[in-house]
Image (spheres, grey):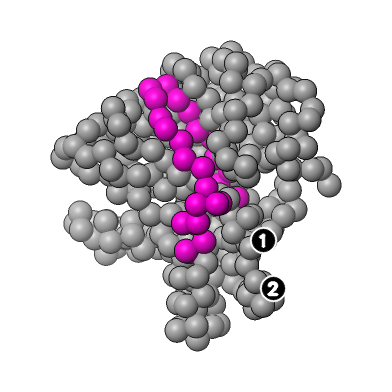
Amino acid sequence: MENFEPNKFEQNSHPYTIKRLSPSIGAELLDIDLKKPLTDSLKDEIYQALLVYKVIFFRDQDLTIEEHMDFAKNFGELEIHPFARNDEQYPEVLKITHNEKNKGRENTWHSDVTWRLEPSLGSILRMKESPKVGGDTLFADMYAAYEDLSDEVKEKLDGAIAVHDFAGFRRGLEKNGVSEEEIEVFNKKYPMPEHPVIRTHPDTGKKLIYVNAAFTQYIKDWDADESSRMLRLLYSRAATPEYQCRFVWEDNSIAFWDNRSVQHYASSDYWPQVRRVERVTIIGDRPV
């Protein structure tokens, strides 16, 4: 198995400069122009950096929508978010704008689309218009969160399965007047999936916490109170500063996070300033 520790990774030469944001998670990759098509070797280097740092960042990338999508397609097929505002010409591009009339609401620790049977591999988000101050995004290393659990808790969670759901989006559909029949179509298309509470990453082979406050409903076959207590404990791990990095956005900055190994939290402290982003998401596989 390859080594995925940052210190050892940095002992090798790389075609970019690495600026780490914390000891275990997050790094800016400098001196890369993403407008240019990636060579196979650079694509492999970037993906390896993603596995090592869990989230990587690029500055000063004035990309077109097509260039943004082309970069993401190096790492897999792109998904279309069924409940969000997407670009009319390119539905794979999710557009998120917050301003004085639409306050930010992504300020919950979460892993994206775990209500899918095959949640995403990762997301690539570009800042189109950043607030003058505020609007940072925080990322949490769920490997470290798992490793610091007690042996007793790890043993208890071995083999445990959690049920996920798009409940928040369903409430939004109901609020917007979507009919029961239309919602039932979504229910059938996105049935409540069951994922391991502790997932094994398909590339690194490392274990990590894979439940989140946004989409996890309960631990299957557990007493309801016991499930709630355990989930509260696991959710709280993302908020531990030692597991985190924090990214200060600038216009044309890009974040590429491994949705399998991190959770993220978009700070909504910038209202009524404008924060405008575009995101593409890479289809993943079924968690094991």
Residue 147 disc label: 1
Q: Which residue is mark 2?
A: 151
Residue 1 disc label: none
Residue 14's x, y, as percent? 73, 22
Q: Residue at x 46, y 36 (%)?
A: 247
What range is drawn magenta here?
235-261
Alpha carbon distance from label 2 to label 1: 9 Å
In the drawing, does residue 196 fall left or right of residue 191? right
Neighbor class of circle 2 (other Cα within 10 Å; few <14, some 14-19, many 20+) is few
Using the image as rendered, state which of residue 13 and residue 168 is in the foreground: 13
Q: Is residue 6 above or below residue 253?
A: below
In the drawing, does residue 151 fall left or right of residue 280? right
Residue 228's x, y, as percent? 45, 77
- Mark 1: which secondary structure? helix
Q: Is residue 85 above or below residue 182?
A: above
Q: Residue at x 22, y 39 (%)?
A: 271
Q: Residue at x 52, y 48 (%)?
A: 244
Question: Which amino acid is tagged 2?
Answer: Asp
Q: Residue at x 38, y 44 (%)?
A: 266
Residue 70's x, y, as percent? 55, 23
